[in-house]
């Protein structure tokens, strides 16, 4: 009798430990395997590249901002800030969203009138899960800034890609959730 009671108690403890401990292990797993973090990211080399286009895209786990460049962009600084300001003047760039990412490419900009939407924004992100606003923040003394309004302070990553041709791309991905 004692053995069967001990076996039942042991079985119950095993089931309870699986039920109680499993959710915390699942909750600890990162969303979509994303482990990017939300701290600033930067690379300091300058470049002779020029910004020629700004594009956005949606993916299953994140929204993407792409800065197309002529030449080879190598330097950047991307991070959450209280406010994004225009390069040179310091004028506030109004951005929709709960958090603001300042995206700086260490490169100039080619004439860009053709990339602006009629409302002055750089991209229509109205149907996006994370992006709320993409705004021009100027180009001054070899640096070009774009303001990115996002839903909340979420993990992001930055990387550079070569091509097409002799151009390059600066890519910023912002996760849909933590």
Image: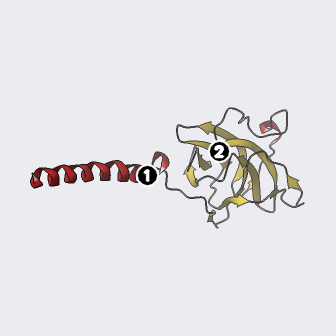
Along the line of sight, the residue nearer the viewer: 86 or 31: 31
Q: Which mark is residue 170?
A: none
Report, in whole angstroms, how far the alpha carbon at label 1 lies from the one at label 2: 26 Å
58 and 146: which one is in front?
58
Q: Residue at x 68, y 32 (%)?
A: 127
Question: Which one is in front in this view, the residue at disc 1 or the one at disc 2?
Answer: 1
The furthest residue to the bottom = 44
| Residue in the picture at 80% in, 43% down | 112
Give the SS element for disc 1.
loop
Residue at horizontal 62 percent and vertical 37 percent from the top: 57
The residue sitting at the front extreme is 1
Instruction: Give how far across and how far down residue 6 sits, in percent.
Output: 16, 55
Q: Which residue is mark 2?
A: 65
Tally of numbered tags? 2
Number of residues whose C-alpha sits closer than 10 Å to that of mark 1, classed few (under 14), some (14–19) or many (20 or more): few
Q: Earlier in the sequence, mark 1 or mark 2?
A: 1
Task: Give yes or no for contact between labels 1 and 2 (Cβ–Cβ under 8 Å).
Answer: no
Instruction: Using a 10 Å C-alpha cutoff, classify the residue at mark 2 as few (fewer than 14 neighbours), some (14 to 19) or many (20 or more).
Output: many
x and y percentages locating residue 84 in the rendered image: 79, 56
Is residue 3 toward the left or the right of residue 49 in the image? left
User: In this image, 119 relative to 46: left or right?
Assistant: right
In terms of secondary structure, where does tag 2 sit? strand
Residue 20 on image: x %, y %:
37, 51
Name the quadrant containing residue 2: bottom left
Residue 176 sits in quarter? top right
Q: How is the image coloured?
A: secondary structure
Q: In this view of the protein, can residue 55 be seen by the observer?
A: yes
| Visible residue check, residue 166 | no
Image position, residue 102 (x, y; %): 73, 56
Front-lying residue, 120 or 23: 23
Mark sitting on residue 29? 1
Horizontal side of residue 42 vs 98, given as left or right? left
């Amino acid at each position: 009798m004692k053995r069967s009671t001990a076996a039942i108690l042991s079985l119950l403890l095993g089931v309870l430990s699986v039920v109680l401990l499993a959710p915390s292990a699942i909750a600890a797993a990162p969303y979509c395997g994303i482990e990017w973090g939300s701290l600033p990211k930067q690379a300091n080399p300058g470049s002779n590249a020029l910004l020629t286009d700004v594009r956005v895209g949606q993916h299953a786990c994140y929204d993407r901002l792409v800065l197309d460049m002529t030449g080879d962009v190598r330097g950047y600084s991307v991070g959450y800030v209280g406010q994004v300001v225009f390069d040179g003047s310091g004028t506030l760039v109004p951005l929709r969203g709960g958090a603001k990412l300042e995206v700086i490419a260490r490169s100039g900009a080619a004439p860009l009138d053709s990339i602006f939407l009629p409302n002055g924004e750089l991209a229509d992100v109205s149907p996006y899960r994370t992006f709320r606003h993409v705004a021009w923040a100027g180009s001054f003394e070899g640096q070009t800034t774009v303001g990115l309004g996002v839903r909340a302070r979420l993990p992001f990553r930055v990387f550079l890609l070569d091509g097409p041709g002799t151009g390059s791309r600066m890519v910023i991905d912002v996760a849909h959730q933590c």
